[in-house]
Image (cartoon, grey):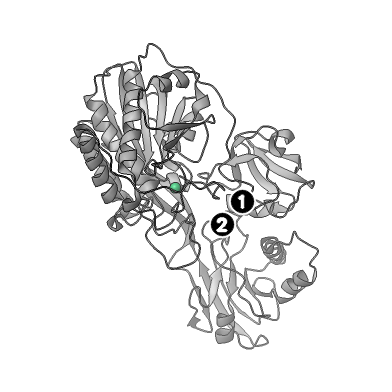
Amino acid sequence: MMFRILFGLILISSFATAQKINKADKKLLTALQKHTFYLASDQLEGRRAGDPGEALASAYIADQFKHNGLSPKGTSGFYQPFTINDGRQIEPTTNIVINNKTLKAVEDYEILSNSCNGKTKGEVSPSINESGQPWFIDLADAMEENKENKENPHFDINNLLSEKIKNAKYKNASAVFFFNSAGNDIIKFNGKDRSEQTPIPSVFITKAGREKYLNDLSNTYQVEANILLAPKIRNARNVVGFVDNGAALTVVIGAHLDHLGYGEDGNSMIRNGAPAIHNGADDNASGSSSLVELSGILKKSKQKKYNYLLIAFSAEELGLNGSKYFVENPTISLNSVNYMINMDMVGRLNDSSKTMALGGYGTSPSWKEMIDAVKEKGLTLKYDSSGTGPSDHTSFYRKDIPVLFFFTGLHTDYHKPSDDAEKINYSGMVKVVRFIQHMIEQDNPTQKIAFTKTRETQTTTSARFTVSMGIMPDYSFSGNGVRVDGVSDNRPAKKAGILAGDIVKQLGEHKTPSVESYMQALSKFKKGEKTTAVVLRGDKEISFEILFQ
Ligand SMILES: [Zn+2]
């Protein structure tokens, strides 16, 4: 599950209580427990997409699929590998030398996140800027001015830097070395920064670096720099298994296998503190374990009017990357898919309320009848009509496929290292698995069920901001700007004419190269204010007047 900001509602789950269950359910419960304890063990280090723990998790699920008699339906056996663009990284050949002394990265200098690559060499005095030479630029005055000029809420350090770099380039500087003689180190390299690249190599010399290597700004120094940044790629993989009954229609059942690792991607609820393994037992070892058991159940099922495609998605937590990759590169015809069932966080059924949330209820008029026909007692169903939400069913909904999303509720361990296997309600998981099994088995398909469009749910709330545009950003988009996945009715973006597929490049004077910078830009506006959004549609840039309400 990938809520970017936690919703207000938190359901506290109680511990599993012992219940009398039949032999088959007991066997199912034991198997679910075994899978969940393994997937959520410290050995898998939080199953972060692209890391060894995720490889172990996907290997385990592929093994289980094979054991259950499924045929491989990935692109490499059961696996469907894909890559994640993870920003840029500083290559080891990068170095800065002043008077024959090599500076230490981070301690003595930071490369600007959007610096271009390049080499420079010169003999310069930091107090004199000459054409054809590297320039030294003190940021102290500009920072001071900003401090005094408190009424300017739109101050943006990146705008300041980019102005100064442009000016230096215009005057034929070969590179820029910023520093802040007033003290603070104000710049940190961020590989996720997707701002436009600088026209000349750009570096920030820290306070420590300045004191060690530039202690007299009126002196002349021999400066040499070689900056090399390269794309950072992570390799992830979906696991895809198929039960081929030779039927015309296929049911897709999915659950994401990845989680947060040690929280390196900034999606943990714990912001400060030592890195800790986020085991993700509920999110989503619970869904992955249920997927494994459903694969065996459906392989043996008497319901042969369907084929079954079971997919464990990776990189859900980064922005539904795995499911987006699958629907763009499907290994069966998406036209043959009757519906998609997604399980994300199904391990915390509350034993007193027994509430199970069903998302996507509005995506087909047939859901009501199909759900009503399930005889399963002991679950209180709560419906959400929207086909979009913070998990992988959204990717299928966007391909006009009816979806049903199973979710037993948020809790205080959500996206924390304490989401552990001991806290899972395994008899609750048995109920969820049986519910899905029975819904599929009592179904008597003659033709595809109808698909209906629903309203959009936003995965981010406006809780931290006073305004929002009403767009759903595409978190997996790695280009420059914020790609719009969907727009909400009656919200500023829709009213202004922004459409799904548009790429928001700028809000007012704030460039928005990434979702993070877009959020930051939003926080600068208040209700009732107007601004201009610059949007890329196809290859045309269009400006829209936005009125925040
Ligand atoms: Zn999650």
Vertical relation: 23 (above or below) 400 = below
For the point 21% across and 36% down, the residue is 66
User: Which quarter of the rendering shows the N terminus?
Assistant: top left
- Which residue is denoted by mark 1 in the rendering? 513
Residue closer to the observer: 64 or 430: 430
- Which residue is denoted by mark 2 in the rendering? 193
Residue most extreme to the top: 446
Characterize the local packing of mark 1: few (<14), some (14-19) or many (20 or more) Cα atoms within 10 angstroms: many
Which numbered dot is residue 94? none
Residue 340, percent from left and from top = 41, 28
Residue closer to the observer: 211 or 307: 307
The CA span between labels 1 and 2 is: 7 Å
Q: Quadrant of residue 328?
A: top left
Q: Amino acid at mark 2?
A: Asp
Element type at marker 2?
A: loop
Vertical relation: 5 (above or below) 364 = below
For the point 43% across and 56% down, the residue is 416
Residue closer to the observer: 167 or 391: 391
Vertical relation: 307 (above or below) 201 = above
Characterize the local packing of mark 2: few (<14), some (14-19) or many (20 or more) Cα atoms within 10 angstroms: some
Residue 383, percent from left and from top = 50, 31
Residue 467, percent from left and from top = 70, 47
90 vs 535, left or right, is left
Vertical relation: 168 (above or below) 489 = below
Q: Amino acid at mark 1?
A: Pro
Q: Quadrant of residue 207?
A: bottom right
User: Which quarter of the rendering shows the C terminus?
Assistant: top right
| Res. 335 in view | no
Q: Quadrant of residue 544?
A: top right
542 vs 52, left or right, is right
Residues marked 1 and 2 touching at CB (< 8 Å): yes
| N-term-proximal mark, 1 vs 2 | 2
